[in-house]
Every structure is written in structure tokens, then in C-alpha cells.
Amino acid sequence: MITLNKKIILVIFPIILSLVTLFHFVIILFHVMPLNPLSNKYSHIIDGYTYPLFVQNWHLFAPEPISSNRIIQMKTQTNGENSEWIDITTPFIDGNHKNYFSPYNRISRLSSGVIQQLFEEDEITLKYEEKTKKIEKKIEEKEQFKTGKEIIFRYASSYANFQYPNNNIEMIKIRIIRKDSIPFSERSKLRKNNFNKFKDWESIYEFNWEPKIEISPIL
């Protein structure tokens, strides 16, 4: 026989689940739809919920889609000696491609999401802010950058603890690099000239050295 408490749970739980699901889809909808006064007004709530795990980017389907790769690299400092730059993005992306139902999926989305949070620029947003002259928006952007920096250093520290558990790493330095790919329409011409390569990587931002954060390994 079902008790009263169980009956209440069976009634309330689906309602709560439905409300949470509705909230999630409404926030994601405002996040991916073109900029409008409502989404701009509540951008701090929308961005706070979506970044970095639920970030979406509609530029993929735009007339001029984004065509560059961005990765996170880090250096470690142990006993005063610095390591070479270490790619802490690609291994998880490759792992995700091999198995989409694995922890690599969430980790790879975390790294791409935090890069977008730090450096993504939307021309429509900038034009809209110019018109409305929203000073508060600039303050929010600075706070967003501060949050993104904290996340990226926690991510790098967690990776360092996973990859080098026996090293007494003291400091970490991070940079974001990007590389524009060659448009498909130009590749045949480049092949004829024996030049079938991607453009060189370029650094778009380099953080200062920061103490490694004590955090659990990423895996």
C-alpha cells in the first residue's frame, strides 16, 4: 500500500522535473536566438547558467561560419624549472571523438565553453551596446572574464594533477592559441602548389603565472 508521503513524492517530482526542464529549454532558447532587448537585459542570468557546460553557438549555421580552432596550452613550473607548452584541450577532444558516451564529452565541452566565455565577440552585441550605451554590460563582461579565468586555471590545475600526479608543481601559466583553417574552396589550388597545410598557430591571449590550485585530478 502506498503511503501518503510516497503519493506526495509521486505527484510533486514530475512537476518539479517538468519545471526544471522548461527552465532549461527557455534559457537555452534565449541563449541561441538572435540578440533582442529581453535577452540583453537578462544576459547575466543566461550566461551564468549556460557557461561553460551548456554553451551553444549559432555561428556554425551563419553565412560566415567560424572556421578556426582554439586550444588551451599550459606550462608548469616545478622547483624553479619551466616545462614546454602542453596541449590540454586536444587529448579530450580526440577521446570524445572515439567515445561520445564518456567523461571526455563533458570535459571537451568545458574547455571550449570557457574559451568562448573569455574571448568570443559578437558583432551584433557590440553594435547593440553602442546604441543603448549600457555601461553595466561592460562591468558584466569584466566579471565574466574574471570567472572564466578562475575556471580555466582550475581546469589546468586539475589536468596537471591528473597527468603529473608525482610532480610537485608550484605554478601554472596558460595561453589560448588559435589557427584559421584553409577554406575548402582554396585547398585544390594549394595542393597544386604543394602547399596543403593549415596556417600557423597564433597566440591570442597569455595569462601570467599563477599558483597551482589544489583540486582533484580531472579524471
Image (cartoon, rainbow, N blue to C red):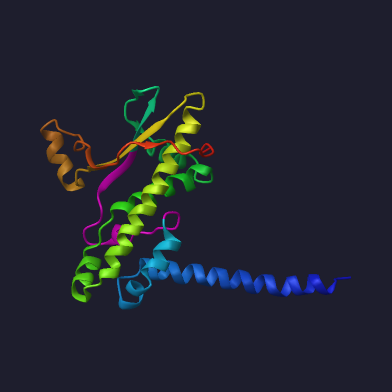
Q: Quadrant of residue 97?
A: top left
Q: Residue at 50% across / 38% down in the picture? A: 214
Q: Residue at 40% across / 48% down in the picture? A: 150
Q: Is residue 23 above or below residue 108?
A: below
**Quadrant, the N terminus:** bottom right
Q: Which residues are magenta?
A: 52-72
Q: Between residues 152 and 16, which one lies in front from this camera angle?
A: 152
Q: Is residue 10 above or below residue 146?
A: below
Q: Residue at 79% across / 70% down in the picture? A: 6
Q: Is residue 213 left or right of residue 133?
A: right
Q: Quadrant of residue 189?
A: top left
Image coords of residue 72 (percent x, y): 34, 40
Image coords of residue 182 (percent x, y): 19, 43
Task: Identify the residue at the far right of this view.
Answer: 1
Image coords of residue 160 (percent x, y): 45, 33
Q: Between residues 125 and 193, which one lies in front from this camera angle?
A: 125
Q: Is residue 163 above or below residue 127?
A: above
The question of residue 40 being in magenta is answered with no
